[in-house]
Image (cartoon, rainbow, N blue to C red):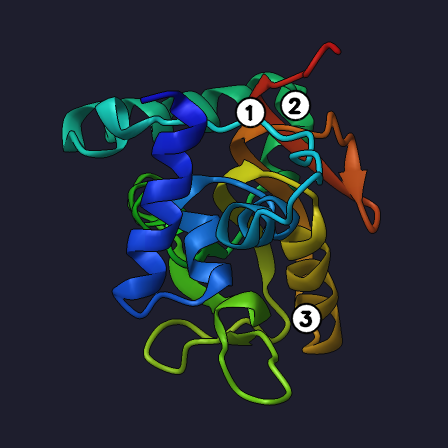
């Protein structure tokens, strides 16, 4: 079985288990466009250009996940000058559901910060899907926030989160991700700090 056949099988299995296309996109670290193609595969249509990242060897092991979170901290503060580092700290770490939550939790502990959870619109199955901050965790109003997720695929979710935070009077100061598939330097003026930039060469 090819890796493409495997991805198609996994996408269809997740759909059969009741996952939305947005949840499947998060689960497989793929764009919505790619997931739609995997689920429908119109005859004669080419697969979208995307890169699948399987990092379960790390994400399924808590000690390795903690080391990854520490690398994100070092990546961010390593780019700050000593006098600038304290001004770049945040009171709230915002984890994007689902894969950003464990990383954000570890980072919030290390930073002695509050933890907020953002549910992206693509995971909402209502007629008019909207993203939201969970009411079970920290509020974000008037707080400096660092946004954490595993992967930037298209940048749409990050754009959504930044706009949401600004609309609700929060101050997003940075975006931290492990993998950046787009090579994005900033989103809506908020700098992106990634551990790895993923490029596809065709």
**Local crowd size for mark 3, using a 10 Å CA cut-off: few (<14), some (14–19), many (≥20):** some
Front-most of residues 166 and 61: 61
Instruction: Give the residue drawn at x 62%, y 29%.
Output: 193
Q: Tell me the element at label 3.
A: helix
Q: Nearer the viewer, residue 31 or 3?
A: 3
Give the residue pinned by disc 3.
164
Residue at (70, 34) in percent of width and height: 46
Which residue is found at the position 53% from the left and 41% from the top? 30
- Name the front one of labels 3 and 1: 3
Badge number at residue 64? none
- Residue at the location (52% across, 37% down)? 151
Query: Do labels 1 and 2 touch, CB within 8 Å?
Result: yes
Left or right relative to 64: residue 176: right
Indicate whether 149 appears above or below 144. Answer: above
* Residue picked out by circle 1: 77
Q: Nearer the viewer, mark 3 or mark 2?
A: 3
Quadrant of the rendered image containing residue 28: top left
* N-terminal-most mark, 3 or 1: 1
Q: Secondary structure at mark 2?
A: loop
Query: Of residues 26 and 73, which is closer to you in this image?
Result: 26
Residue 10 shown left or right of residue 81 in the figure: left
Q: Which element is circle 1 on?
A: helix
- Upstream in sequence: badge 3 or badge 2: 2
Q: Is residue 56 above or below residue 120?
A: above
Compared across the picture, whether 125 is left or right of 163 comes to left
Mark 2 surroundings within 10 Å by alpha-carbon count, few (fewer than 14), some (14 through 19), many (20 or more): some
Q: Count numbered badges in the picture.
A: 3
Find disc 2 in the rendering and name its residue: 80
In the displayed structure image, the side of residue 1 where residue 41 appears, left or right = right
């Amino acid at each position: 079985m090819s890796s493409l056949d495997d991805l198609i099988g996994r996408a269809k299995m997740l759909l059969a288990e009741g996952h939305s296309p947005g949840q499947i996109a998060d689960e497989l670290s793929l764009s919505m466009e790619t997931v739609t193609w995997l689920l429908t595969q119109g005859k004669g249509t080419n697969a979208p250009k995307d890169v699948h990242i399987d990092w379960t060897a790390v994400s399924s092991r808590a000690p390795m996940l903690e080391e990854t979170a520490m690398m994100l901290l070092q990546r961010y503060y390593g780019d700050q000058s000593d006098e600038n580092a304290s001004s770049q700290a945040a009171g709230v770490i915002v984890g994007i559901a689902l894969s950003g939550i464990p990383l954000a939790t570890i980072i919030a502990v290390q930073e002695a910060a509050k933890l907020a959870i953002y549910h992206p619109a693509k995971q909402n199955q209502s007629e008019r899907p909207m993203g939201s901050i969970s009411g079970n965790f920290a509020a974000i109003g008037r707080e400096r926030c660092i946004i954490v997720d595993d992967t930037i695929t298209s940048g749409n979710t990050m754009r959504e989160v930044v706009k949401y935070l600004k609309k609700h009077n929060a101050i997003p100061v940075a975006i931290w991700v492990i993998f950046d598939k787009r090579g994005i330097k900033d989103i809506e003026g908020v700098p992106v700090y990634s551990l790895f930039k993923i490029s596809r060469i065709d």
